[in-house]
Image (cartoon, rainbow, N blue to C red):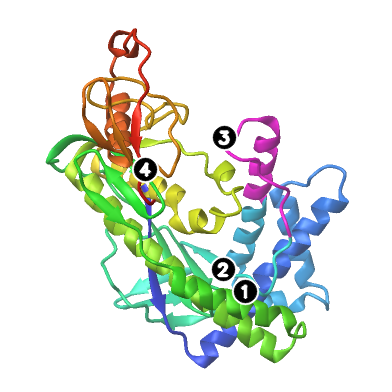
Amino acid sequence: MKARYQYRFYPTDQQQQSLARLFGCVRVVYNDALAICKQSEKKPKSAQLQKIVITQAKKTEERAWLGEVSNIPLQQSVADLEVAFKNFFDSCKGKRKGRKVGYPKFKKRTNSQSARFRIGGFSIKGNEVYLAKIGNVSPIWSRELPAPPTSVTVIKDCANRYFLSFVVEIEPVNIGAKNQSIGIDLGIKTFAVMSNGEKAESPDYSLLDKRIRKLQKKLARQQKDSRRRNKTRIRIAKLHNQIADTRKDFLHKLSTKVVSENKTIVLEDLNVSGMVKNRKLSRVISQQGWREFRTLIESKSEKFGRDFRVISRWEPTSQVCSNCGYKWGKVDLSVRSILCLSCGTEHDRDGNASKNIEMVGTGHRHDLKCTSRDGKTTSVARSDEA
C-alpha cells in the first residue's frame, strides 16, 4: 500500500525564486491545457495536450520561459488535469461514489502551490534532496522514510510554508490488539465516546476562531490587490493552518491509539454535508474533522491489519437501550442521560450510542421485536446541559 511522508524545509532566497518560477510554470501549463479543453468540442488526449502546451509552447516568445524549469513537473501538471477530468466524468456517469465532482477550475496564484517530481527529477543524497533545476534542499527529517520514494511533491501553502511530500510503498504490519472490538460515537463537545467507557475531548478552537473572524472583517474593508490586504490574508492563512495543525495532531494521535488497541473498529456513517446546513452548528461541525478521522482510521486499519466497519446512518443507536434492547424512540438533543423503564438502567446518551454502534457493527444487535414490551410505557429522560 502507498503512504505519504511529509517534511517541512526552509529554502534559501535563491531557491524561493526558483520555486516561485516553477510553481508559476506549472500553474500556466495547467490553465492553458484547461482553456484548450474548454474551447474544444471533444477533450484532447493527455499526450496531445502535452505537445501543445509544453513542447510547442516553448518555441513561442510568450511561453519561452517554460524551458527554464524542469520538464517533469510540467508533464505531471497535465496528468493532474487528466485525473480531474476523469473524476468529473466518472461522477457524472455515477461510477464515482460520494459527492458529485465539479468541472475542473483554473488555478490561482493566491492558493496553495505544488509541483510533483517523478523518479529522474529528484534524488536523495544523505540528508539533502536534489530537485531538478532547483538544487539541494534540506528538509527536517522528523522520521525516517521506510522505503525509497517513487515521487516527491513540493508544496507551498497559503501561509508561505514549504513542504516535501514523499510517496512510498509500505507493507501492512500485524500487531496484537488488547481489545476485540470497539464502537465510537462522534460528537462536538466530546469528540469521541467509546464503548469501553473512554472519552476524547476535542481541542478548543474558539480563541483562534475569534481572531480569524476579526481579521476577516478587516480584510473585507481593505482594497483588493493592496499590500495591506495581502498581509492580512497571510495572517488569516496562518491562523487557519494553526487550527488545521492542532486538529491533525489530535486526530492522528487518537486514531493511532484506537487502531493499535482494537482489532475491530466500528463507526457510524454520518451525513456531515446535511448536518452543516444547521446555521448554528455548521462552523463547529466543520472544525471537528469527522471525515478526516474516519479516513485516518480506515488507512491505519489497512496498515495494521485491522477490521474497519461502518454502520448505516439510519440505525437508531440513540433510541435503543444497549442493555436490554428496549426502543424508547427519538429523544431531544438536550437530553444527555436516559433511564430505561424496561430494565431500569441509566445510560449516558453518547455512551449508550457507542455500545449500540459496536453491537450493530459486530452483528450482536438485540432483537428489538423480542425485547420490546407489549404494554404502553413511556420512557423517562433526564435533561442536562449539553
> From the viewer's perspective, is 33 left or right of 302?
right
Extent of the magenta region:
82-105
| Residue 104 colored in magenta in the image | yes
Tally of numbered tags = 4
Question: Image point 57% across, 38% down: which residue?
Answer: 98
Kindly identify the amino acid type of the residue bearing the numbered disc 3: Lys
Q: Earlier in the sequence, mark 2 or mark 4?
A: 2
Q: Is label 1 or label 4 in front?
A: 4
Q: Choose between 320 and 204: the one closer to the eye.
A: 320
**Residue annotated with mark 1:** 23
> From the viewer's perspective, is 23 left or right of 142?
right
Q: Position of residue 193 (x, y in %)?
A: 29, 45
Instruction: Assess whether mark 2 and mark 1 are in contact (beta carbons under 8 angstroms).
Output: yes
Gap between marks 1 and 3, in whole Å? Answer: 31 Å
> Considering only vertical position in the picture, is 55 above or below 339?
below
- Considering the numbered disc 1 on the image, is that residue within a helix, a strand or a loop? helix
**Residue annotated with mark 3:** 97
Question: Image point 49% across, 53% down: which residue?
Answer: 285
Q: Earlier in the sequence, mark 3 or mark 4?
A: 3
Gap between marks 1 and 4, in whole Å? Answer: 56 Å
- Considering the numbered disc 2 on the image, is that residue within a helix, a strand or a loop? strand
